[in-house]
Image (tube, rainbow, N blue to C red):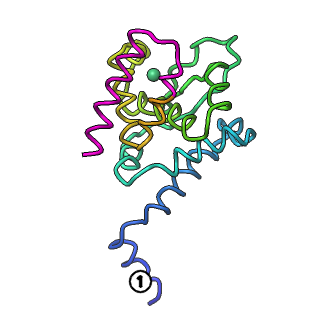
């Protein structure tokens, strides 16, 4: 009797946002490949910040993404030799990016992680990811998650270049739109 009731409830009521984030957190951060994240409190805080920023609609995008997403901590000695493995998408983080994540404010660091996730969710090839269009698509996802301001602040600290300026301007447009 009791079980039937629970079953009915589960079918009808959508999981709360907090429960969905918890499911995502456990599934994502507890995999063996992510032990390096939980072993550094600053980096862990940034990843947790990403999870806590996800909405129902951004969580839906991860649900629709079939592959597992693994962030790799590389020493820089191994280049992009690890790209394809069935069922897994790798995000290779080089030492300077890891250093940036560890040294930036938690929200800014979270915006870097979200940008990388944006590349994966958009299905970018390495070449597409490097292109300015690819960068702006990844920035778009960051803005959807609500970390566009943080990413823009971070980009403003970078050495100016044509690509950086384009991304900053693109984020301004996205942020203006989301504030309407
Ligand atoms: Zn990028």
Residue 175, by quadrant, is top left
Point 34% across, 17% down: residue? 166
Q: Which of 118 and 3 is in front in this view?
A: 118
Callout count: 1
Q: Which of 40 and 156 is in front in this view?
A: 156
Point 41% across, 83% down: residue? 4
* Whole-percent x, y for residue 123 in the image: 37, 27
> Dot 1 corresponds to which residue?
4
* Ligand 1 rendered quadrant: top left
Point 41% across, 18% down: residue? 129
Point 38% across, 9% down: residue? 162
Does the magenta portion include 159? yes
- Rendered view: 84 above or below 77: below
* Whole-percent x, y for residue 18 in the image: 49, 62
* Whole-percent x, y for residue 68 in the image: 50, 38
Which range of residues does the magenta coloring cover? 154-180
Residue 133, by quadrant, is top left
**Element under disc 1:** helix
Q: Which of 16 and 79 is in front in this view?
A: 16
């Amino acid at each position: 009797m009791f079980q039937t009731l629970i079953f009915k409830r589960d079918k009808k009521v959508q999981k709360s946002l907090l429960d969905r984030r918890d499911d995502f957190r456990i599934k994502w951060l507890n995999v063996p490949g992510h032990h390096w994240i939980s072993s550094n409190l600053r980096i862990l805080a940034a990843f947790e910040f990403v999870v806590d920023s996800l909405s129902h609609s951004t969580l839906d995008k991860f649900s629709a993404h079939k592959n597992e997403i693994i962030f790799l901590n590389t020493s820089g000695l191994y280049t992009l030799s690890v790209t394809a493995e069935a069922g897994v998408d790798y995000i290779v983080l080089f030492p300077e990016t890891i250093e940036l994540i560890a040294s930036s404010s938690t929200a800014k660091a979270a915006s870097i992680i979200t940008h990388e996730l944006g590349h994966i969710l958009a299905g970018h090839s390495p070449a597409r990811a490097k292109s300015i269009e690819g960068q702006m698509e990844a920035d778009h996802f960051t803005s959807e998650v609500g970390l566009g301001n943080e990413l823009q602040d971070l980009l403003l600290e970078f050495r100016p270049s044509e690509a950086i300026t384009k991304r900053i301007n693109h984020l301004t447009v996205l942020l203006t739109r989301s504030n309407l």
